[in-house]
Image: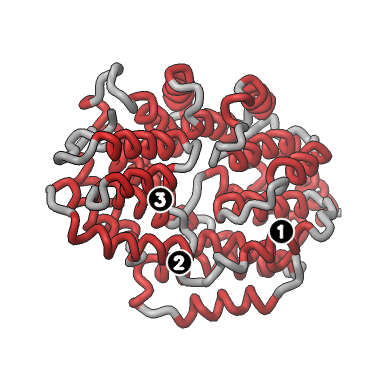
Amino acid sequence: MYLANANGVDGTAIEHFDAAVRAFNIYRGDPVALADQAIEAAPDFAMAHILKAYLFGLATEPEATAEAKSILETVTPLAKTENEMSHIAALEALLGNNWTDAAVQLDRHNIEFPHDIVGLQAGHLMDFYRANARNLRDRVARVLPKWSEDQPGYSVVLGMYSFGLEEAGDYARAEAVGREATEREPLDCWAHHAVAHVLEMQGRAEDGIEWMASREPHWTGDDNFFKVHNWWHNALYHLDVGKSDTVIELYDARIRGDESQVALDLVDASALLWRLHMEGHDVGDRWTEVAQCWDAHADGKLYPFNDWHAVMSYLGAGREDEVSRILDQYRSAGESGGETARWAQATGLPLIQGFRAFWEGRYDDTVDILHPARYVANSFGGSHAQRDIIDWTLTEAAVRSGKSGVAEAMASERLAVKPHSPINRRFLKRATASHQAVGE
């Protein structure tokens, strides 16, 4: 049982809640439906409402955020315990677009309630969405000594710790902890994905392909919320070893086979199409389908990381007016927009401008815009693997612009991390050829 204090709630409601928490923990099944069943059995069950509010509030989608705000209004008068009221404070900050305030509130919450796995996972996701690598690691490190191996959810905590270690650059420990987590709970998609990140960051593409294949039955089920993102990782490995045809097949069959409307899946689709485009592949009208799906999410207000990926597809689909709409929204946003408005202006704006310049063939401008932007890009959203598209685009623009010194420097930087990557080797070869041509 995950719930430490049910406050006299009906046993059936607790069973449904526990099932909802487990579904949330391993990203499988339908935690919203299970939370609804808990609420139906006990309408005043505050933690069931709180879990549901997090599920919608962490989706980074406008419609889901509106639903989370409605749930928060319902649950606020029901919250009676210190634990519940602490969650309410975190949700109020989150839904006010103040992710750091929410994450810090959960820092304190996790210290006070170290076994509250809902609070721990919600905080972990907030750290991910605001790209705080240190707290991805340390939030879990602070509470891990309070957990015992025989406690329900222990493997899930290990999986979170693995991802935090990876984002903090401790790859050896991240891989060891992630593999232990998957051995303890083979269905834990997050732990599997943490190891996938290690292999991606170390340039171990062949190992990555083997890792995905060896565990495919555990992460590809229809009820697996995270399956598209893990297919995306698989596609990145194949792209790195030069198997572009396989990447396109994976895109069509696995990444967009179900035409998911989920923002997380659309991020993966946009990013993969952009990489294929930079590699010189004609992706046809695939941009159009993804761009149409982004229309429900890319409002220029909620989450700039999503907007930036929507812009990739809008550029590919020839919908320049949508790019301008988002940029105008960023420029006009005031303090009332909260922390995400500051992210949009400080980081989202130059990234979108740089990617638009690249699409329009203004490669000198791309280099000038993205070179400084790359140093602030980890102030919002996503993982190191996801944000690598910035340096990739910068390097490609440097090669195409004839800025041979910048191109060689960027290629050498990439090769230092991934010395066996065919893509990075090609970057250096092209940069060196450009340098030699300039010198002749």
* One can see residue 270 in this view: yes
Identify residue type, mark 3. Leu
Label 2 – label 3 distance at C-alpha: 16 Å
> For residue 341, what is the image quadrant?
bottom left
Q: Which quarter of the rendering shows the N terminus?
A: top left
* One can see residue 139 in this view: no
Q: Considering only order in the chain, which callout, 3 or 2, is on the residue closer to the N terminus?
A: 3
Question: Residue beneath label 2, please?
Answer: 302
Q: Label 1: few (<14), some or many (≥20) within 10 Å?
A: many
Nearest the viewer among 206 and 437 is: 206
Mark 2 vs mark 3, foreground winner is 3
Q: Considering only order in the chain, which callout, 1 or 3, is on the residue closer to the N terminus?
A: 3
Secondary structure under tag 3 reads helix
Nearest the viewer among 333 and 425 is: 333
Q: Give left or right: position of 129 versus 287.
A: left
Label 1 – label 2 distance at C-alpha: 29 Å
Secondary structure under tag 1 reads helix
Question: Residue beneath label 1, please?
Answer: 397
- In the figure, 86 relative to 145: above or below? below
- Residue 55 is tagged as 3
Residue 168's spot in the image, x, y percent? 41, 37
Q: Give left or right: position of 398 versus 145.
A: right
Residue 233's spot in the image, x, y percent? 63, 37
Q: Residue at x 73, y 60 (%)?
A: 289
Residue 79's spot in the image, x, y percent? 18, 54
Identify residue type, mark 2. Leu
Label 3 – label 1 distance at C-alpha: 39 Å
